[in-house]
Image: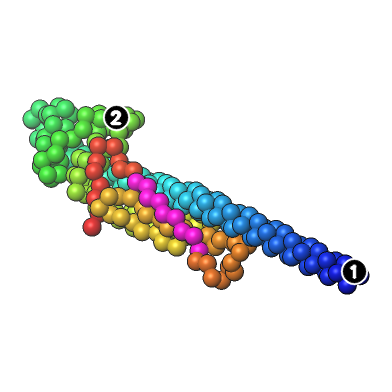
């Protein structure tokens, strides 16, 4: 009887040990599954953060490009306006100097009309904007930039100036993109391209992900992309080669 009792106790002990192993195994499996779900959620979190960084970087690069372009167009237009004013003063003085003593000089408005016809002919037949004409009469008049740009440079000229400005500012645009990518917890800007035909910037940022169930070295960085229009001068369509 004692031997049978010992056998039963041994069997019960084995059953208890087996149940313990099963419970420990189930607990470990549950922990592993929980970690997997945690890593899966991390993927979406990292992707969202990376996308936010890409959007911010693209917006920053586009803003930098647009502001530099606008400044350059304004500078070039101001140069042309000042040169036009100098030509007008020289033209007026030359006409008045050519008038003989016994002749009645033409009125300033008549001289201005001749000057405008001459300037329009030398600017591809484009009409001089009214506010530019008014500025020639009185330099205190404010001139609207875009019509003046079209008169001085034509659509093709404005297009070339805008494209050149964006390319000249590319390094600054990259710095701004890098800055905003890092401020939004991205590691770096992997790609920054100027897409000339659409007048936009294209950005790819990346962020190194960290997971619990796999080593960091075995996982590629998570990337996101974004594209933003630079913004064209009003009434112009800009396309770059």
10 Å neighbourhood of mark 1: few (<14), some, or many (≥20)?
Answer: few
- The kind of secondary structure element at disc 1 is loop
Q: What distance separates the C-alpha of mark 1 from that of mark 2? A: 126 Å
Q: Are marks 1 and 2 in contact (CB under 8 Å)?
A: no
Residue 227: say if magenta: yes
Res 80 → quadrant: top left
Q: Position of residue 91 (x, y in %)?
A: 18, 40
State the residue position of label 1: 1
Q: Position of residue 220 (x, y in %)?
A: 50, 66
139 or 100: nearer the viewer: 139
84 or 78: nearer the viewer: 78
10 Å neighbourhood of mark 2: few (<14), some, or many (≥20)?
Answer: few
- The chosen color scheme is rainbow
- The kind of secondary structure element at disc 2 is loop
In the image, is 167 to the left or to the right of 153? right
Q: Judge whether 11 appears above or below 157 on screen.
A: below
Of helix, strand and loop, which mostly describes the magenta segment?
strand
Residue in view at x 30 percent, y 33 percent = 143
Label whose residue precedes the other's in the sequence (1 or 2): 1
Magenta part of the chain: 221-230
Residue in view at x 30 percent, y 43 percent = 232
Outermost residue to the left: 103
In the image, is 204 to the left or to the right of 125? right
Residue in view at x 85 percent, y 66 percent = 9
152 or 69: nearer the viewer: 69
Residue 63: say if magenta: no
Residue in view at x 59 percent, y 62 percent = 210
State the residue position of label 2: 138
């Amino acid at each position: 009887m004692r031997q049978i009792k010992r056998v039963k106790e041994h069997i019960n002990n084995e059953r208890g040990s087996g149940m313990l192993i099963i419970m420990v195994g189930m607990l470990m499996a549950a922990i592993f599954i929980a970690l997997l779900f945690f890593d899966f959620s991390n993927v979406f979190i990292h992707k969202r953060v990376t996308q936010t960084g890409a959007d911010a970087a693209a917006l920053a690069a586009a803003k930098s490009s647009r502001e530099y372009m606008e400044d350059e167009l304004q500078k070039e237009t101001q140069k042309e306006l000042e040169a036009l004013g100098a030509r007008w003063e020289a033209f007026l003085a030359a006409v008045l100097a050519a008038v003989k003593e016994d002749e009645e000089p033409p009125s300033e408005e008549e001289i201005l009309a001749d000057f405008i016809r001459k300037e329009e002919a030398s600017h591809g037949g484009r009409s001089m904007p009214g506010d530019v004409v008014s500025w020639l009469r009185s330099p205190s008049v404010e001139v609207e930039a875009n019509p003046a740009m079209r008169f001085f440079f034509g659509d093709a000229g404005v297009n070339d100036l805008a494209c050149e400005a964006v390319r000249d500012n590319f390094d600054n645009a990259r710095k701004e993109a890098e800055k905003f990518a890092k401020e939004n917890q991205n590691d770096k800007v992997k790609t920054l391209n100027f897409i000339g035909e659409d007048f936009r910037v294209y950005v790819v940022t990346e962020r190194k992900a960290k997971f619990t169930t796999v080593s960091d070295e075995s996982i590629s960085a998570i990337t996101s992309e974004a594209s933003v229009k630079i913004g064209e001068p009003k009434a112009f369509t800009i396309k770059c080669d």
